[in-house]
Amino acid sequence: MSSTGGPGSPVIEVRDLRMRYGTKDVLTGVNFTAAPGEVITLLGPNGAGKTTTIEILEGFRMRSGGHAQVLGTDPATGREDWRAKFGVVLQNWRDHGKWKVRELLKHLGEYYAPYSTELVPRPWDADELIETVGLTEQADKKIRMLSGGQRRRLDVAIGIVGRPELLFLDEPTVGFDPHARREFHDLIHRLSDLDNTTILLTTHDLDEAEKLADRILILAGGRIIADGSADYLARQMSTEAEVKWRVDGDFHVHSTLDATDFVRKLFAEHGDAVTDLEIRRASLEETYMSMVQQFESGNEEIAIHQFQEATR
């Protein structure tokens, strides 16, 4: 069903993306791609350019320079038939409280009907969509009667009612309680598997980024300085590992640059006397916070250099 420009083509392709506001350069050369069905999280400090990047890809803001292709089209020239191929879920959406859930989704779906094809039947059937996002019991309720978590599910339903190939999510779980957040994460995983939908989301929740993303992009200094899975970034960006163990009941802790070599020597010396062995590398959150602190202290170039060196 993809219309990205051919089999295997990226859904999003960005090269040397630049954006200037007056004399201020917000984006100075952003590069990344997104494959069909991939879930990508865009992280970065406030003011890093996350929203600007997303708005350029959505075609709502014109870039100052560079190359951008979304679903095989330059966002700057995308027409309505192109826009019908992606969905947007904003952090805040002004809903119409008097509408019932099923009525609203049927109404919005009518806007996508002209863009239906044999390969991509648009829009979703309202009841099928309601079941997919977990709102079956609320289908005939007025929107103002929904809980916060249920409203967010409705936001997603609105974003995907046109059966998009690409979904943009902005801070999707702000204000969620832990139960609602977990249910929402399950929904996003189902959507990424369903029809090979690609998802690009922004969040300040590092735990959420680890749970949802196939890949994490960290935007800082106007460009992408880290790109990889949460596990890869945590391993590559950390400089030391903390090794904990017991020998004859005594507890020990040691920090080392080479945990494998240290543990090998540890067992060579103590053998089976080593118990409760634990190796802990810096988490994604700790690594990310280190970068943010560098930026907040004004050492932007140092932070960028550290991340680039760590991820080579």
Image (spheres, rainbow, N blue to C red):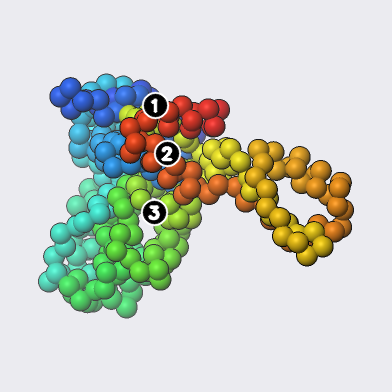
Question: In the picture provided, is 108 more to the left or to the right than 50?
Answer: left
Q: Residues within 10 Å of mark 1 (few under 14, many from 20)?
A: few
Closer to us: 160 or 31: 31
Residue type at numbered disc 1: Glu
Front position in the image: 49 or 108:
49
Q: Classify mark 2: helix, strand or loop.
A: helix
- At 45% across and 63% down in the image, what residue appears? 186
Q: CA distance from mark 2 to mark 3?
A: 15 Å
Q: Say above or below: 43 vs 184.
A: above
Q: Position of residue 44 (x, y in %)?
A: 36, 41
**Lateral position of residue 86 relative to residue 194, left or right:** left
Mark 3: secondary structure: loop
**Mark number displayed over residue 291:** 2
Whichever of callouts 1 and 3 sits on the residue coming sooner in the sequence is 3
- Above or below, comparing residue 17 to residue 1 in the picture: above
Name the residue type under label 3.
Asp
Q: In the rendered image, which residue does mark 3 sit on?
A: 205
Q: Earlier in the sequence, mark 1 or mark 2?
A: 2
Which residue bears the numbered disc 1? Answer: 301
Q: Residue at x 19, y 71 (%)?
A: 143
Q: Is residue 191 visible?
A: no
**Residue 93 image-quadrant placement:** bottom left
User: Can you say whether 309 is above or below 38 in the image?
Assistant: above
Above or below, comparing residue 86 to residue 193 in the picture: above
Image location of residue 298, percent across then percent down? 33, 32
In this rendering, would 144 be left or right of 302? left
Q: Nearer the viewer, residue 163 or 240?
A: 240
Q: Give how far across and how far down residue 34 sits, in percent.
A: 43, 37
Residue type marked 2: Met
Report, in whole angstroms, how far the alpha carbon at label 1 lies from the one at label 2: 11 Å
Q: Are marks 2 and 3 in contact (CB under 8 Å)?
A: no
Snapshot quadrant of residue 25: top left
